[in-house]
Image: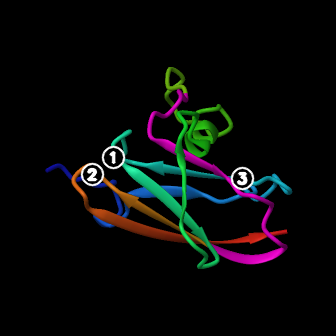
């Protein structure tokens, strides 16, 4: 059994959640929820709940991690010009049925890994 440990975080921190609206909240009207499950694979189950509703499945969708894209785009001087963002193979996506209403929301993500362990993480976000 292996366990991923993100640098600077406790062992329970197993994912990065990108709520609808994008990394900086500027993509108003968007419905896409993204989750980077750090030790994820096609053998994981990933689900989300919006505002304590029923859990809904997410789909494994390899793509750029929005934070890596910002950090490696040249906007932030990394001192490593050879480092470029590449599609992440452990990104999950869900397209919400409709954009969240304006206001504050909470999204909870539940991951069951290939060993049957379950991890939960929540993120509060404001949708303008």
| Whole-percent x, y for residue 48 in the image | 54, 63
Secondary structure found at label 1: loop
Task: Note whether 99 is above or below 53 in the view shown.
Answer: above
Q: Please tell me how crowded label 2 is: few (under 14), some (14-19), or many (20+) other residues with Cα within 10 Å.
A: few
- Magenta span contains residue 75: no
Q: What is the span of residues highlighted in magenta in the rendered image?
A: 85-106
The answer to whether residue 60 is left or right of residue 9 is right
Task: Note whether 72 is above or below 47 in the view shown.
Answer: above
Residue ID at (32%, 67%): 12
Quarter of the image holding residue 97? bottom right
| Whole-percent x, y for residue 43 in the image | 33, 43
Which mark, by number, is residue 4? 2
The Cα–Cα distance between marks 1 and 2, rounded to whole angstroms, is: 6 Å
N-terminal-most mark, 3 or 2: 2
Q: Quadrant of the C terminus?
A: bottom right
List the residue tagged with mark 1.
Answer: 39
The image shows a total of numbered marks equal to 3
Q: Cβ–Cβ below 8 Å for labels 1 and 2?
A: yes
| Whole-percent x, y for residue 40 in the image | 37, 45
The answer to whether residue 67 is left or right of residue 39 is right
In the orientation shown, which residue stands out farthest toward the left?
1
Task: Note whether 71 is above or below 53 in the view shown.
Answer: above
- Magenta span contains residue 102: yes
Task: Note whether 31 is above or below 124 in the view shown.
Answer: above
Secondary structure found at label 3: loop
Which mark, by number, is residue 22? 3
Secondary structure found at label 2: loop
| Whole-percent x, y for residue 78 in the image | 54, 36
């Amino acid at each position: 059994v292996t366990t991923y440990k993100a640098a600077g975080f406790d062992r329970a921190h197993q994912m990065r959640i990108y709520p609808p609206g994008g990394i900086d909240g500027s993509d108003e009207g968007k419905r896409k929820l993204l989750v980077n499950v750090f030790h994820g694979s096609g053998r994981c189950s990933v689900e989300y709940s919006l505002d304590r509703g029923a859990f809904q499945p997410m789909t494994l969708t390899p793509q750029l991690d929005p934070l890596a894209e910002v950090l490696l785009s040249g906007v932030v001087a990394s001192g490593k010009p050879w480092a470029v963002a590449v599609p992440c193979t452990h990104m999950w996506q869900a397209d919400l049925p409709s954009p969240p209403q304006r206001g504050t929301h909470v999204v909870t993500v539940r991951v069951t890994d290939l060993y049957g362990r379950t991890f939960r993480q929540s993120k509060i976000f404001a949708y303008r």
